[in-house]
Image (cartoon, grey):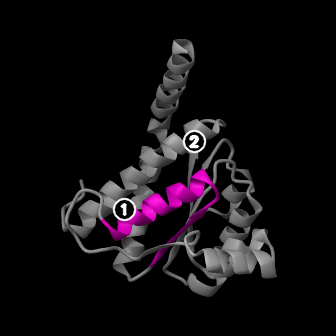
C-alpha cells in the first residue's frame, strides 16, 4: 500500500513541477478575467463530473471570496440548475446541455471557462463553439494535448499529464492561482 501512495505523491510532484511553465499563462488569463469583470462581464463555468466540481469551485471562489473580504464577482456555473440541464438533455441531447445555456446567456465581454480533463467532451466543445459564436472569450482548463477544445480556446491551461487525477489536481491549483489574482484585484490591492 505504501508503494501505491508513494507513487501517487511522486506523480503529483512531477506534474506540479512541470506546471511552472504555465505561470505566464495564468497571469495573462488573470489579467483577461480582471478586464472582463471590470467591464461588467460575467464568468460562466462548466464541466462534467470532477470537472463540474472544479467549475463550481471556481465560481464559489469568485462569488464568495478566496482569502479577502471583498465584493462578489459575477460568475455562474452552468451545471448547477438540474431542471435546465435535464430539460435540454431530454428535449435536445446531452451534447447540447452547455451550448444552449451559453447561447442564451454569454455575450461579448463575458468569459466562458471550460473544465475538461481530455478536451474531448462533445458538450464542452459545443459550449466553446457557442461562446465563440457569441463573441465571448474562452478559457480552457484541460490536460494532455487539449483535444478539439484547444482550437476553440482564447486562453488555455494544459496540465502536463494525461492522467485524470493529475490533471484535476493541477486544475485546482490553477483556479486557486486565478482566484488569488482576482481576489487581490477586487480587494483593491496592487498586483505585482
Q: Residue furthest top?
A: 3
**Magenta stretch: includes residue 77:** no
Secondary structure predominantly adopted by residues drawn in magenta: helix
Q: Badge 2 local density, few (<14 within 10 Å), some, or many (20+)?
A: many
Residue located at (69% from left, 44% from top): 145
Closer to the camera, 121 or 17?
A: 121
Q: Are marks 2 and 1 in contact (CB under 8 Å)?
A: no
- Magenta residue span: 42-64
Q: Give the image location of residue 183, x and y in percent.
A: 28, 62
Residue found at x 19% / y 61%: 190
Q: Closest to the observer: 75 or 36?
A: 75
Q: Position of residue 186 (x, y in %)?
A: 26, 69
Q: Is residue 141 visible?
A: no
Q: Which mark is residue 116?
A: none
Looking at the image, is mark 2 or mark 1 earlier in the sequence? 1
> Which residue is at the front of the view, 88 or 67?
88
Whether residue 161 is situated above or below residue 44 in the rendered picture: above
Residue shown at 47%/51% (left/top)?
Answer: 25
Quadrant in which residue 188 is drawn: bottom left
| 48 w.r.t. 82: above or below | above
Q: Position of residue 140 (x, y in %)?
A: 58, 58
- The residue at the point 37 percent across, 50 percent down is 177
Whether residue 46 appears in magenta in the rendering, the answer is yes
- Badge 1: residue crowd in 10 Å (few <14, some 14–19, many ≥20): many
Kindly state the secondary structure of the residue where label 2 is placed. Answer: helix
Left or right: 134 with respect to 15? right
Circle 1 sits on which residue? 61
Q: Would you name the residue on which mark 2 appears?
A: 167
Numbered disc 1: secondary structure? helix
**Residue 10 percent coordinates (x, y):** 50, 21
- How far apart are the two marked residues, 2 and 1, measured between alpha carbons? 20 Å
Q: Quadrant of the N terminus?
A: top right
Amino acid at each position: 500500500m505504501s508503494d501505491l501512495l508513494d507513487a501517487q505523491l511522486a506523480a503529483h510532484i512531477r506534474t506540479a513541477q512541470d506546471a511552472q511553465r504555465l505561470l505566464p499563462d495564468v497571469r495573462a488569463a488573470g489579467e483577461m478575467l480582471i478586464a472582463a469583470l471590470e467591464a461588467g462581464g460575467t464568468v460562466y463555468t462548466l464541466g462534467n463530473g470532477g470537472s463540474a466540481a472544479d467549475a463550481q469551485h471556481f465560481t464559489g471562489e469568485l462569488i464568495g471570496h478566496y482569502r479577502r473580504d471583498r465584493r462578489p464577482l459575477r460568475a455562474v456555473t452552468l451545471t448547477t440548475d438540474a431542471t435546465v440541464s435535464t430539460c435540454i438533455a431530454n428535449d435536445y441531447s446531452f451534447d447540447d446541455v452547455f451550448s444552449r445555456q451559453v447561447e442564451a446567456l454569454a455575450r461579448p465581454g463575458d468569459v466562458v471557462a471550460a473544465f475538461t480533463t481530455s478536451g474531448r467532451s462533445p458538450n464542452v466543445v459545443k459550449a466553446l463553439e457557442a461562446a465563440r459564436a457569441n463573441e465571448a472569450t474562452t478559457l480552457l482548463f484541460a490536460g494532455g494535448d487539449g483535444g478539439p477544445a484547444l482550437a476553440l480556446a482564447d486562453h488555455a491551461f494544459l496540465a502536463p499529464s494525461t492522467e485524470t487525477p493529475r490533471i484535476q489536481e493541477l486544475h485546482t491549483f490553477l483556479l486557486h492561482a486565478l482566484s488569488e489574482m482576482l481576489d487581490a484585484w477586487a480587494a483593491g490591492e496592487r498586483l505585482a
